[in-house]
Image: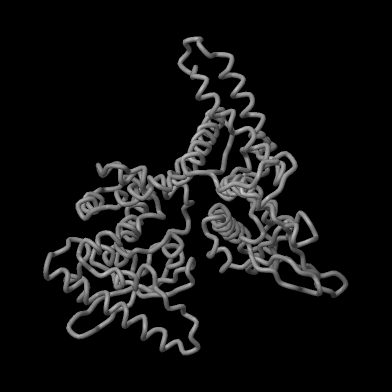
Amino acid sequence: MKAVTIRYTLKAKSKILEERTQPELVLAEVSGAFSSKLNGKTNYSKFQFSLETHITPKYFGKIKEKRGVKNYVYDINTINDFEKYNKVLRNKINDFKLHVENAETHFKNEDPTAEAFKEHLKKITGRTQRKPISNTLILDFLKNHIENLESIIGSGRKDAVENSTINSYRNLIPLVNRFEEAKYKLSFEKLNEECYREIWKTANDIRTGSIKIKSYKLKAKDPYKTNSLKSYQTYFIKLCKLAVKKNIEIPLDLSDENLINHAEENRSNKTNAFLSEEDLLKIHNYNPTSDSLSLAKNYILLASLTGMRNQSMKEANGRKIELCKVNSHNFFYVHVKQGKTKTDCFTPLFDVALNIIKNNNYFFPDFTKITLFNLNKNIRKVIEISDIKNSNLFSSHNLRSTYVTNMALMNIDQSIIGYVTHPKKKAISSVAIYDRREMLDKVQTVTEAIIKANKIRKSTFYSFGKTNNN
């Protein structure tokens, strides 16, 4: 069969763009391979397939006009710019692409109709056997939980709590009520990270007067204090975990430590949440017992030794490394594209990172086929098995702090480290050769600083050895 074309769209809740401020269902429109002839005329067919995730239009794409009608059009740069709001969507898109490839292989020697192709997609995604999705309202569940706790006060039961604890749950009721008055009904089944973040943003917007609702008549105040917000979030997450125990499905990654606001506390946590070279050695010596743990181990080492963000690690999939010969020092590097800041840079590859890539035929490994939830879970598992403390503090998002901290401990100037972690040059020059030369100059500066630092104190992981001179 012919290759299909996929276009992502939103199921609009309003024809007026300004009113489209709530999350909308994402659809994949599949076309290009389905045609039939009738009376000598070729007719083309297409179909839509739900990705079963919602996203606010402004985080999905740009507004474009076609035939006099303006609409939000899927844009990869927008997706990258707002990556913290669309993690679930990016995983859904990656999964859908794999399902489409599976279906194309199934119909390799056929010319399926659009309906047959869609039915096969339903089959391999399990939708033909799926039970209707329940819709558990968070407010109803919260009120029932409070009633249950009130009924067992003083009973001596293990799950009985003090009235002060029940009050912490009671305090969530007005918060949820106000959100639903301003936005939409909250259900566990649709509680993804984007929705979760929107809850707390809306709470602050109502408190400060940015959003007006009839039930909130108090004068505008400052945003919630850190500890107040932390308390709300702590008990909200506890409620979600209780729902999961009752077999209610929630898309939100409840194991993510960053779901709870630790504005003051996180400064010390982030300082501690890096892997020392001793820790990296433990991970390097760890022998994974599965492919998923092996992938997580490689991710930890590569992210810690390149300073790359999660999006950059995925974007580099299949990219071939290059060799730079400067003075008497030869070293390999990889071209890193940072979607969050829309910048490019070259990152030098230390020996351990280089060996991982060499073992993958000199191409950067593929981290696109694992969901962020599973990746983070496996990262923590590898760190825990390697007998490293505070494994719960680590995720794919903060491993780059390991790179920054260890380089700083080698007395490498922050401005030089920034050539890799925070490049200021945007790759927009019309003269591509100039862009490349400037990035080469910077990666050489970084490399020379590392070589100089190693002459003073030899680093086990942040150094270039014989491997880089091959």
**Looking at the picture, does residue 293 appear above or below residue 368?**
above
Camera sees residue 121 = no
Q: How many marks are shown on the rendered structure?
A: 0
Residue under the image location 53 percent in, 54 percent down: 87
Q: Check the image and name the residue furthest to the front.
A: 219
Can you give x and y, in whole percent of width and height, for residue 374 in the image? Answer: 45, 47
The quadrant in which the N terminus is found is bottom right
Residue 108: image quadrant is: bottom right
Q: Check the image and name the residue furthest to the top.
A: 155
Residue under the image location 23 percent in, 68 percent down: 412
Residue 384: image quadrant is: top left
Q: Check the image and name the residue furthest to the left.
A: 456
Q: Check the image and name the residue furthest to the right.
A: 39
Judged left or right of residue 364, residue 237 is right
Can you give x and y, in whole percent of width and height, for residue 180 in the image? Answer: 69, 41
Closer-to-camera residue (453/262): 262
**Looking at the picture, does residue 289 appear above or below residue 113?**
above
Residue 139: image quadrant is: top right
**Looking at the picture, does residue 304 appear above or below residue 287?**
below
Residue under the image location 73 percent in, 59 percent down: 47
The quadrant in which the C terminus is found is bottom left
Judged left or right of residue 354, residue 435 is right
Can you give x and y, in whole percent of width and height, for residue 64 in the image? Answer: 71, 72
Residue under the image location 19 percent in, 80 percent down: 329
Judged left or right of residue 36, residue 129 is left
Can you give x and y, in whole percent of width and height, for residue 20 in the image? Answer: 73, 57
Camera sees residue 287 = yes
